[in-house]
Amino acid sequence: MSVNAKIVIIGCGISGIGAAHRLVNAGFHNVRILEATARSGGRVKTGRLGDNIVEIGANWIHGPSEENPVFCLARHYGLLDPEALTPENQAMDIGGHPPWVPNFFSSSGRKLNTEDIEPAKEMFAELLIESSEFQSQGGEPCASVGDFIRSEAQQRAAERWKDINAATRSLRLCLISNFLKVECCVNGSHSMDEVGLGAFGLYETLPGLDCTFPGGYECLIKNLMSELPGGLVTYSQPVRCVHWSNTEKRGNPVIIECDTGERIAADHVIVTVPLGYLKKHHSALFCPPLPLHKLHSVQRLGFGTNNKIFVEFDSPWWDADCEIIYLLWEDEDMMVDEVPDVQTSWIKKLFGFTVLKPTDRYGHVLCGWIAGHESEYMETLSEQEVAQNITQLIRRFTGNPTITPRRILRSQWFHDPWTCGSYSYPGRGCSLQDLENMMEPLPTKGSQAQPLQVLFAGEATHACYYSTVHGALLTGWREADRLISHYSSVCPSELHKSKL
């Protein structure tokens, strides 16, 4: 039985590829991947802006150090810059927020003095750390990170900044609004009011200064794919429904029904679809439906949109050493991370830009970041409208009416029908139990039916590295290992030891 077990993986993103790799290397020779689109990689997606390679999807290796499997694979395949490989780089512990050199601009067209607003930056960093401490100690004072940061910042600003002039105090509060928008991008949420305070601290960072792939993240996918047997992936093959059995034992307990009408019998299916897709399509995707406790976790976990807008210029309007640009709206001293009217002021949700470095590789290219419903609305506009809005924005904040971008390119993750957003975050009322429910196979324990029929992988099923590529990869390995250990206990002689 064992190595002949028929295993179907739904989704050819990095978790599906990782699972296939692991299974094939352990001696399973009846493994296939069904992929809805015409390409591999899922939310790892590299594009071009003029002559530049840019990331439409995953951007960094977060925490490039020995414990990060994405870093280890990238190093193995020779895909990284020499700087990323240094021990100094791997040892740097940035706690998820890289120490980038900032420039600050205000909506009245001034480049701001960093010293004036530094205290607000420090206060925000301290509040973020405190926000993640309730997970271990419990007793959180409010439901969301946004509520907590606003109420605490209000009190601390009143105490600490009572003697500074009103204009500077107002500007500092505008910075808090901006940093809330930054966190919306980091967390992939519409507002920090939707991110649960109790579970915020579940996320864990790895040491290492975040790095990128000079040749694009997709090089990692290409290398992994090249090691899988040819023909293992069927592209443009969306799955309509996974039929599994909750009760009786039967041969090939799983039937995967494709959009084409084809029905594929299997012993096991590993579902790696994004949480955004699962939220929207779970009722049609599983028959019988997901058990209630699992469905409720799917609903409680958050899944939002974070998009990028790449902008290329003939010459820079930021400092040579600048790595990140923050845009402060001077009317936002109420610590807000949502705009009043999405259609007229969506652009206010864009917190600023990261600078693509090194300059000799990219020229003068910025990456703008925008999350939430404003970001989803941006996707519906033409590229020309987005370019006009970005041009207007930059002219306003620099006070220079002649700046004109050479070209732009934006991502549109919300309208991608197979993703429906960007990545997951713990919503209000979420706990570790929800992440554990996400990864629990079907049928659940105690059923008389054949075990491990439906397994779940993907970034939203990792208990502490959700939202990351390394989290996704580790979950693919985890589910493959679950099957490998199941079969080594059922019929140990037939499996060779895993090479991965």
Image (cartoon, rainbow, N blue to C red):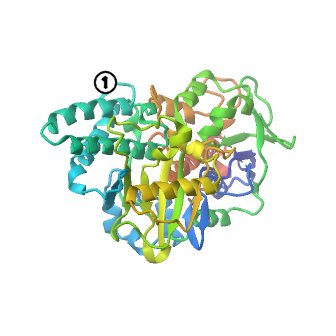
Residue nearest the observer in this picture, 205 or 52: 52
Residue 334 lies, in percent from the top left, at: 33, 34
316 in relation to 248, above or below: below
When asked about the image quadrant of residue 53, the answer is: bottom right
193 in relation to 358, above or below: above
Whether residue 70 is visible here, answered yes or no, is yes
Residue nearest the observer in this picture, 477 or 496: 477
Residue 23 lies, in percent from the top left, at: 65, 52
Label 1 sits on what residue type?
Answer: Pro
User: What is the quadrant of the C terminus in the image?
Assistant: bottom right
When asked about the image quadrant of residue 442, the answer is: top right
Residue nearest the observer in this picture, 52 or 437: 52
Image point 36% across, 59% down: which residue?
208
Residue nearest the observer in this picture, 312 or 179: 312
190 in relation to 51, above or below: above
User: What is the quadrant of the N terminus in the image?
Assistant: top right
Residue 287 is left or right of residue 404, and the answer is right
Judge the density around disc 1: few (<14), some (14-19), many (≥20) Cα neighbours within 10 Å. Answer: few
310 in relation to 290, above or below: below
Outermost residue to the bottom: 360
Outermost residue to the left: 163
Whether residue 216 is visible here, answered yes or no, is no
Image point 24% across, 57% down: which residue?
113
Outermost residue to the right: 261
Q: Secondary structure at mark 1?
A: loop
Image point 35% across, 71% down: which residue?
320
Residue 254 lies, in percent from the top left, at: 76, 36
Residue 83 is left or right of residue 251, and the answer is left
State the residue position of label 1.
141
